[in-house]
Image (cartoon, helix red, strand yellow):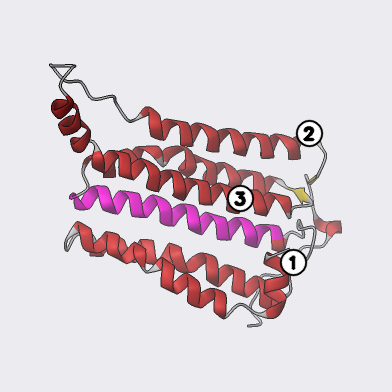
Amino acid sequence: MDDLPAKDGPASRRHVFERGELEFDRLAFFSDAIYAISLTLLVVGLEVPRVIDTSSNGDLWDALDELEPEILMFFISFLVIGSFWLSHHRFVARLTAIDRSLLFCTLCYLAFIAFLPFPSGLLGEYTDNSVAVALYALCIAVVATIEVVLFALAYKHDLLTVEPTHETFRWGVVASLTPALLFFLSIPVAFVPPLLGMLVWVLNIPIGILTDRWMPAKATAYYED
């Protein structure tokens, strides 16, 4: 593919903050803080069940059974948000500098990270509701898409410590966009029945395995470094 985004040389960059400068560190710390708050809000949304007979084991088990979808959704969402944090952590570790366009895009990215506990709680409460499934899928798809935009900006603006080859860059974009496209696809499917929309999400596992098998050798060295 010859239509890759043209890269901006160092001479053309403005408002660039190198690693070690205050603005760079503020971005990293602020991102971690948003992730920490988002993960904390997941458990805050779980309310301790109340039973009339506090000494009744059966009543408490019944109350906990009613909370089962919300508890399950907590752990799933914790895993999802945690995986986004790991991905963002690796991305920031590869940055040698940031600029204003990357800062703005990161703010948009973190806005959806901070918002994720809401659709997570909604889905835990209304698992069989198409709107709840679609909203959760939309938020996950948007976050995954913005991750690609961040990577593309860092590549185009020459902000990476190690410059990936064109082949490595293309593979990274395709690998990151694939789950986003699956979540976008699941939105209309969720209105057939909601469960079918959620089953589309599971396709990320086999497709991810296949994508990893097609990883170019240079990409393997870059992403596993």
What whole-number distance in Å separates the C-alpha atoms at marks 1 and 2? 25 Å
Q: Does the magenta stretch include residue 181?
A: no
Question: Of the numbered discs in the image, which one, if any, rests on residue 69?
Answer: none
Q: Residue furthest bottom?
A: 1
User: Who is closer to the viewer here, 49 or 58?
Assistant: 58
Disc 1 crowd rating (10 Å Cα; few below 14, some 14-19, many 20+) is some
Instruction: Magenta stretch: give its range.
Output: 128-154
Q: Is residue 153 magenta?
A: yes
User: Who is closer to the viewer here, 131 or 175?
Assistant: 175
Quadrant including the N terminus: bottom right
Q: What element carries label 3?
A: helix
**Which residue carries the number 3 mark?**
88
Given this view, does label 3 or label 2 mark the residue nearer the observer? Answer: 3
* Position of residue 58 in the picture relative to residue 212 (left or right): left
Percent coordinates x, y for residue 208 in the rendering = 48, 70
Quadrant including the C terminus: bottom right
Disc 2 crowd rating (10 Å Cα; few below 14, some 14-19, many 20+) is few
- Tag 2 or tag 1, which sits nearer the N-term? 1
**Which residue carries the number 1 mark?**
7
* Position of residue 107 in the picture relative to residue 77 (left or right): right
In this picture, is 30 found above or below 217? above
In this picture, is 7 found above or below 2? above
What whole-number distance in Å separates the C-alpha atoms at marks 1 and 3? 22 Å
User: Who is closer to the viewer here, 179 or 8?
Assistant: 179
Given this view, does label 1 or label 3 mark the residue nearer the observer? Answer: 3
Residue at 31 percent across and 66 percent down: it is 200
Residue 167's quadrant in the figure?
bottom right
Name which residue type carries label 3.
Answer: His
What whole-number distance in Å separates the C-alpha atoms at marks 3 and 2? 19 Å
- Tag 2 or tag 3, which sits nearer the N-term? 2
Q: Is the magenta stretch mostly helix, strand or loop?
A: helix
